[in-house]
Amino acid sequence: MKKYKKIALALALALSFAGCVNNNEGAQNTSTTEVAETQSTDTSSENVNEKDPADVEEATGEAANDNANEDNDVEATGKIEDEPRYGTPIKVAYNGGICTSGPGIASVIGEFEKRGLEVEFINVESDVDSIGTHTADATVGHITKFVPPTVNGVDMVFASGAHTGCKSLYVIDDENVNSTADLKGKTIGIPQPIGSSDHNIAIRFFSNDGIMPEEVNYKQVELAAIVQALENGEIQGAILSDEYADKFMADGTLKRIRSLTWDDDFKDETCCVNALNGEFVRENPLMAKAYNEAVLSAQKWMEDNVDEAIEILYENNWASGDKEAATRMFDSYNWAVTIDNTEQTLGVVFDDYDRFGIINTDMTKDDFIANYFNSFGVKDSDFN
């Protein structure tokens, strides 16, 4: 296999194999002295910088995109060398998992260097907090987690999709539960707090099957205890990352009854997104564009070179455990998810959350897309 040089600043962060699993789902994010480790004092990762919706909408003219879309002439600001942050590292927040590996692999295979960019990876407890508090300039995270805080005022720009898939609804492998209909009136365990992305994913599963949010109960259960809670009947279903559940599927403990990864109504949706801090984008649009190009180019490479991408993850301690399982899960994602697909998914999630009451705003889906989605003129055809 072709070997790639290691870029010391970018590769020091050690991530465990957790795929779409954040810190409270068991990811061991061990940083070294070459990585700035930061922790936000605000533990409310999905409501940081919450503002009155009316204030947010009044400020939409100053939102990160400034009505930006593919036609936005970002190059009108001048040369990239004239931007205030040029020559300093773009700070990229990691919170663990294979599905956040796009920027890391982009660094290893030289995509940032090719565009004259430096990156610095920082280990954070909350990707949302890191953007909202300006600790980081960029991050990767689940779309269902990012939409509500952005509506509530976190200054975030969605630049592109990272991949599809990654989480599913699991139950004990017996004959008692075979569909979401069997879980009406039952309790679903989620490793994250009520109102988190796991909770919202579950609501979308049930809603697509005609089951209203109030017809199902939810309970936060620590990840390490969630399978035991299923076995003893404390909960009857659980939202888990496919990577975490893989070994329990293999030994016959669990079965999957609903999935972002494999079900026809979800498998083509963007799961995780590449997001940037809005102020960084407004002040450095050409750097933001170059960053987005670098990550998208790396993701296309990852889609076409799964085995080599997995080797990079293991060589840099970004993955551990069963390499076969890691490869299987990595290959189940579509890393070449399109920009159009990501924009569409953002709109669908926004409409769902508005309907469920997860977000409270007079903003329309079109307003949300116009103000918070910006591919900086990057097109899918640029990577074909």
Image (cartoon, helix red, strand yellow):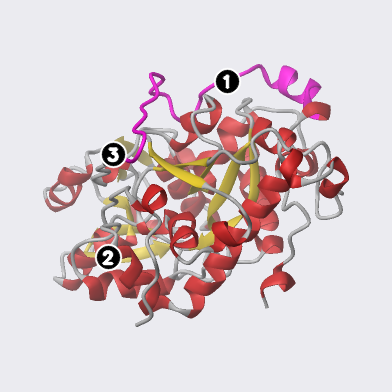
- Asked whether disc 3 touches disc 2, contact meaning CB atoms under 8 Å apart, the reply is no
- Identify the mark nearer the N-term, 3 or 2: 3
Q: Which amino acid type corresponds to the residue marked 1 in the rendered image?
A: Glu
Q: The residue under label 2 is which amino acid type?
A: Glu
* Residue 123 highlighted magenta (yes or no): no
**Residue drawn at x 59%, y 67% as measured from the top left:** 297
The magenta segment is 33-60
Residue at point 46% right, 69% down?
A: 333
- Amino acid on which disc 3 is placed: Asn
- Residue 20, x across and y down, in percent: 38, 53
- Residue underneath mark 3: 24
> Is the stretch drawn in magenta largely helix, strand or loop?
loop
Of circles 1 and 2, the one toward us is 2
Which badge, 1 or 3, comes first in the chain's sequence?
A: 3
Image quarter where the C terminus lies is bottom right
Q: Residue furthest bottom?
A: 1
State which quadrant residue 41 falls in: top left
Q: Residue at the location (51% across, 58% down)?
A: 209
- Mark 3 closeness class: few <14, some 14–19, many ≥20 residues within 10 Å: some
**Rendered view: 131 above or below 343:** above
Camera-nearest residue between 188 and 295: 295
Q: Which residue is mark 1?
A: 50
